[in-house]
Amino acid sequence: MEESSQTRPEDAAPPPPARRRQQQFEDKRKAILGAALTLFSQKGVHGTSVDNIAALAEVSKGNLLYYFESKEVLYLSVLRQLLALWLEPLRTFSASQNPAEAIGAYIRRKLEASRDDPQASRLFCLELVQGAPLFGEELSLELRDLVERKADVIRAWIADGRLSPVEPHHLIFTLWSITQHYADFAVQVEALTGRTLADPGFFEETVANVRQIILSGVLPRA
Amino acid sequence: MEESSQTRPEDAAPPPPARRRQQQFEDKRKAILGAALTLFSQKGVHGTSVDNIAALAEVSKGNLLYYFESKEVLYLSVLRQLLALWLEPLRTFSASQNPAEAIGAYIRRKLEASRDDPQASRLFCLELVQGAPLFGEELSLELRDLVERKADVIRAWIADGRLSPVEPHHLIFTLWSITQHYADFAVQVEALTGRTLADPGFFEETVANVRQIILSGVLPRA
DNA sequence: GTCTATAATTGGATAGAC
DNA sequence: GTCTATCCAATTATAGAC
């Protein structure tokens, strides 16, 4: 942890002390949240101790519990951040777009998220597989509303004849499940293909294949 | 626990005592394995105590640890059972089949498994998301071999012009991810659709939609 | 705000009676 | 084979010094 202030030139005004202190406070919270995400997504909530998180975040356990009053509060804080990030790509869907482009772009964005931030996807997966016991209400609230609006977009495309008739929820589930598969089951993907999304060739191959399967299917058009 | 022997008619020979004892032994093992699967798949390994499992299986903790020498051994026993069950549907794929029928039948079978035995799918998911730390070697061994043989089947279909050119692994991943989604994320599916696979109407709707998406895609054939 | 005890529980595993 | 009692390690959370 370098202290940049010691090299700051005299003519650059230092930030007011109050703001600096708050900045440090926020930085530390972020460090703890980041460490918590890493470990929770690897070992689950119950497989991770506050001590482990504190060690990774380079703070003492006592200090961690000053920033987050309990392990459960910390876990919920991590999840809350996640949901926003996780929903983001779906928001861009709009009826004015060309469905092939909109869905194609969505697939790429979700695969980018699986490549760049697999921990988020994995923790979300762990929580949902276990029935989202701590998260259920918030889930139904924000997610339900967004999904219904996007289902309407899909229905509009179908009504225009720009998409084959398909129940929107199943299409959304398919898009979610396949794109997240490359993050959540990365161990399996690597064991079977010998490659990961970090490999640009494999990433583009994945985007192209998923797009083809969802958009055109696997049966020859003949 | 009823003792059926007390009502057995005299002319029906009782099984030899040694065999009877072994039967009881196996029954109890199965009861413990079943309880373990239920709880591990709900709360994860670390979220489940030996005590919890013993209580659900209606044995004492001491007795449970007579049947399985440690919690880890029990967990691995559960996983081993699972892998066989999980791989089964893929074995039926063969090059002599019509690809549309083979893939369509596979989708139905996997969705049946997601409906009838969601716990197995969920525990498998939990283990893999966390990197399969206890399971990695066994995974690569049996799974890799089977998947390579099935990838060859898919390649043969493509060579015959019976399937659009697609990288076989990505098709397999798509099939796995979407069919398991309905088991692993059942909470979310129900929150968003208000229905579950236990509802026969929803089950058939799901089979039909997944088949359509994978086989024909969502773009109109025009 | 940060750290070092320490209290209070819980959980895995063993010992030994029956 | 089965159960109870017990040991020991790990963990969450708090108390109190600095």
Image: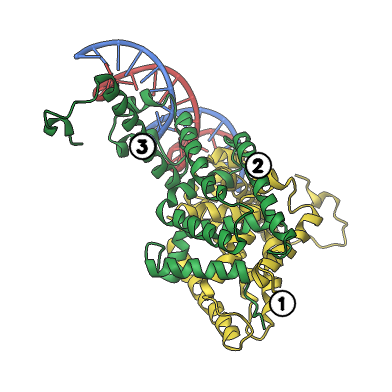
Chain colours: A green, B yellow, C red, D blue
Q: Is residue A92 left or right of residue A51?
A: right
* Residue at which label 1 appears: B101
Q: Quadrant of residue B20?
A: bottom right
**Residue sitting nearer the eye, A3 or B111:** A3
Q: Quadrant of residue D17?
A: top left
Q: Is residue A12 left or right of residue A34?
A: left
| Disc ID at residue A36 | none
Q: Is residue A85 left or right of residue A55?
A: right
Quadrant of the image containing the N terminus of chain A: top left
Mark toward the viewer: 1 or 3: 1
Nearer-N-terminus badge (2/3): 3
Residue B86 image position (x, y, % from top left): 60, 64
Graded by Cα atoms within 10 Å as few (under 14), some (14 to 19) or many (20 or more), the crowding at tag 3 reads many
Residue type (three-letter) at the residue carrying disc 2: Arg
Same subunit under labels 1 and 3? no
Residue type (three-letter) at the residue carrying disc 3: Ile
* Residue at which label 2 appears: A144
